[in-house]
Image (cartoon, grey):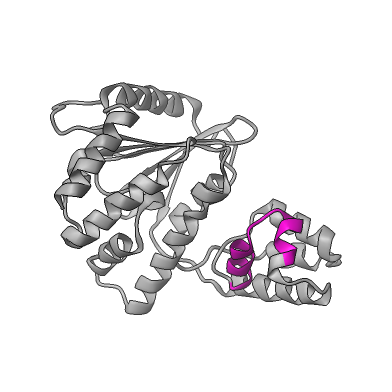
Amino acid sequence: MTDSTISTETVPNEPEPSDSLKAFGEAHKAFRKRAGHTQEDYAPLIGYQPSTVASIEQGRRFPQRRFVERAEEILDAFGVLKGVYKHATREKGLASWFRQWAELEELAISLYTFENRLVPGLLQTEGYARTLFRERIPVISDSEIEARVVARLERQFLLTERPNTIFSFIVEEHVLRRQTGGPEAMREQIEHILEATDPRNVEIQVMPMSRGVHAGHAGPIQLLETPENEWFAYCEAQESGRFITDPKAISLLHMRYAKLRSQALTPEDSRSLLERMRGAL
């Protein structure tokens, strides 16, 4: 994945099975109970929130490698958890083309997102996400909608469990003015954005409609930095995603993102605008 000779990867938009994650979760729960731990007293030992432990044991969240290694050590699992983990795949709510990015996203120390189509997934409310999936073409089943909503909301633990990660979001104003799900749903969405971006490490900037031309007209941009200070990028299209490792391509996206930051409203002015928009709904 970090091989610089491979610049991009595009894979089809199809969900993956969750049976292997459920198997890992059951194995982990068995070893935890064998060791006499509840989820609440076990979570601080492994360095995660009880809700994260619960989600992993239910097969709803893909465990990070360091979670598995720490679990092996604490639970004395004889290598069983590592063995099951080798066969684990993402839950069905996350498309296969998103897998590589999601794995890195959980480790990132910097995460930059520009969106000109919809509210970024990490900032979406349940109502907003459900509306998007309900209106999807072709139509998907109610169970698939539920799986995708759960998977999307589960990712948002990043904003609360990684206080030292820098999150930067730039969103087009017209995205926030579109009443996706109706006025009340959008008021809730804007309120959620204000709350989610209140911590010092989470920043929101709005690209005003009054700016006729800006550096992001080619489409959404996502950039992240790993603990090893490697940078990766991700660009999403209609039915596929493009995972980018080529340094030249990433440098270009960095330049565009830097320009977008200078063209958007400041974080303070952006929050003021969001507060006025919320009050008008």
Tell me: residue 122, above or below residue 137. Answer: above
- Evaluate whether residue 118 shows in this view: yes
User: Is 19 placed above or below 210 here?
Assistant: below
Q: Position of residue 116 (x, y in %)?
A: 25, 41
Magenta highlight range: 41-58
Q: Where does the N terminus fall, quadrant-wise? A: top right
Does 174 sit above or below residue 121?
above
Residue located farthest toward the front when viewing the structure as drawn:
279
Can you give x and y, in whole percent of width and height, for residue 141 in the image? 32, 77
Where 119 sits versus 249, above or below? below
> Which quadrant holds residue 44?
bottom right
In the image, is 158 to the left or to the right of 209? right
Q: Residue at x 58, y 61 (%)?
A: 62
Apparent side of residue 179 relative to residue 94 in the rendered image (left or right): left
Residue 106 position, x and y percent, is 56, 48
Q: Is residue 27 left or right of residue 101?
A: right
In this view of the protein, which residue sits in the foreground, 270 or 21? 270
Depth check: give the residue in front, 39 or 191. Answer: 191
* Residue 139 sits in quarter: bottom left
Residue 252, located in which quarter of the rendered image?
top left
Magenta stretch contains residue 149 = no
All told, the count of numbered labels is 0
Predominant secondary structure, magenta span: helix
Does 45 appear in magenta? yes
The answer, for residue 7, to whether it is visible in the render is no
